[in-house]
């Protein structure tokens, strides 16, 4: 038994969620046929907020669907081939997965068979801290691989041989580092760390979408800098992100310090921008390689591209709030203390149009467009003055333009 962590789930609001007890009973929890599993159990033991609730059960998917519907709830076959049904409970999803064992794996995906053995189901999970189960009624824990001890020691440990577990699913390398950054203590002498370094080249076999998703989750944690530094120095990221260097890690540390000093929440994409060289073309190449959305790629480009503005608000007007905050916190525009004022900032609209300039005497055509652009630049640089002041500025511009054309 592990001293320091309870042998039962502590009482918590999420366990009393309306309808959850009814759902568990419908799945046979009182007969030992359904248990909470994974992140909900781990986070509850650590006293962290529980967001997602997962339930494991001995019942196969068709029977799960029948039981969920019989309880008056909606059942969605979100991953039925892998035994996962999602029950909708008060508009919130609860994932219910049949106990499984791996039949075959190829490093990217597994073929599974349904089973009824709880230990077999635990054995196919990645880390000991994620293989903890709890009875819904009384919270009694079921720990087959000393996950409580590892959780107490802040130790991320593979279940079984780490080399074999990585060979089954290469993404476990990145998950190891993410869980270490979130829950663990970095131990470069551990066999688990060594196995991740040894098999780093296998990351190349993964889809870039999976790599991007896992990396952005890692970078979005409160302070992943030490873990990322170890990944860089030991070559773990070279197969998928060779652009990241030691200097990028130092930029990441500076960004994290700026975020903390200003109270701005971390964003994985901003942290990725810190790790990359300040080269917009290269940033776009990385975004394309990772199959990021067009919006995310644009954000990476803008973080690295040259930008000039008279004020932080002018920068936000030109680039958008997110990109302006990124550049400021990255130390590429203005000083960090300006960033909080831009959070949630809505860009104003120029209160005049080309029609207003024509009404003041300009002839419709290219001259109107050029004058309107000049007016907009002056309006932005002067801090977005009100409509009356802007109209005065426009009249002066129009009069000057008309005089020069005479």
Image (cartoon, rainbow, N blue to C red):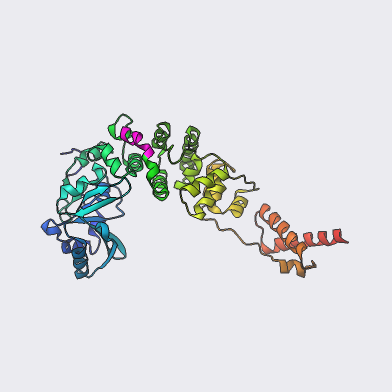
Residue drawn at x 21%, y 38% as measured from the top left? 149
Q: Residue furthest top?
A: 189
- Number of callouts in the render? 0
Could you tell me which quadrant the N terminus lies in?
top left
- Magenta-drawn stretch contains 371: no
| Magenta-drawn segment | 194-201
* Residue 8 in view here: no
The quadrant holding residue 30 is bottom left
Where residue 11 appears, as percent x and y from the top left, is: 21, 52
- In this view, the residue in front, 46 or 24, is 24
Could you tell me which quadrant the C terminus lies in?
bottom right
Where residue 371 appears, as percent x and y from the top left, is: 75, 60
Magenta-colored segment: predominant secondary structure = helix
Residue 373 appears left or right of 228: right
Q: Residue furthest left?
A: 31
Residue drawn at x 48%, y 47% as measured from the top left? 289
Residue 117 appears left or right of 91: left
The quadrant holding residue 356 is bottom right
């Amino acid at each position: 038994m592990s001293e320091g962590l309870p042998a039962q789930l502590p009482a918590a609001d999420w366990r009393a969620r309306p309808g959850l007890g009814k759902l568990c009973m419908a799945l046979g929890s009182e007969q030992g046929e359904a248990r909470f599993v994974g992140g909900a159990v781990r986070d509850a033991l650590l006293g962290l907020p529980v967001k997602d609730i997962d339930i494991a059960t001995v019942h196969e998917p068709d029977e799960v669907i029948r039981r969920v519907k019989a309880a008056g709830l909606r059942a969605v076959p979100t991953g039925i081939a892998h035994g996962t049904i999602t029950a909708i409970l008060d508009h919130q999803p609860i994932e219910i997965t049949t106990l499984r064992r791996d039949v075959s794996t190829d490093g990217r995906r597994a073929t599974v068979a349904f089973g009824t053995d709880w230990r077999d189901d635990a054995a196919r999970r990645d880390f000991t801290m994620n293989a903890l189960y709890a009875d819904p009624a009384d919270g009694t824990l079921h720990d087959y691989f000393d996950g409580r001890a590892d959780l107490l020691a802040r130790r991320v440990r593979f279940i079984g041989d780490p080399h074999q577990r990585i060979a089954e699913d290469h993404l476990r390398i990145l998950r190891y580092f993410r869980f270490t950054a979130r829950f663990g203590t970095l131990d470069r002498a551990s066999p688990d760390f060594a196995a991740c370094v040894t098999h780093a080249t296998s990351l190349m076999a993964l889809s870039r979408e999976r790599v991007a998703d896992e990396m952005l989750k890692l970078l979005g944690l409160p302070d992943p800098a030490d873990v990322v530094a170890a990944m860089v120095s030991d070559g773990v990221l070279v197969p998928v992100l060779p652009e990241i260097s030691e200097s990028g890690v130092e930029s990441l540390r500076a960004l994290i310090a700026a975020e903390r000093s200003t109270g701005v929440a971390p964003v994985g994409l901003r942290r990725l921008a810190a790790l990359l060289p300040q080269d917009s073309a290269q940033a776009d190449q990385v975004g394309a390689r990772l199959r990021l959305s067009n919006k995310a790629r644009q954000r990476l480009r803008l973080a690295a591209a040259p930008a000039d503005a008279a004020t932080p608000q002018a920068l936000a007007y030109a680039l958008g709030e997110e990109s302006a905050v990124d550049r400021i916190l990255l130390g590429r525009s203005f000083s960090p203390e300006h960033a909080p004022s831009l959070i949630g900032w809505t860009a104003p609209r120029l209160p005049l149009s080309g029609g207003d300039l024509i009404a003041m005497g300009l002839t419709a055509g290219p001259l109107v467009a050029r004058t309107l652009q000049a007016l907009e630049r002056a309006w932005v640089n002067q801090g977005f003055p009100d409509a009356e002041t802007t109209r005065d500025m426009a009249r002066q511009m129009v009069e000057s333009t008309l005089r020069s054309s005479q």
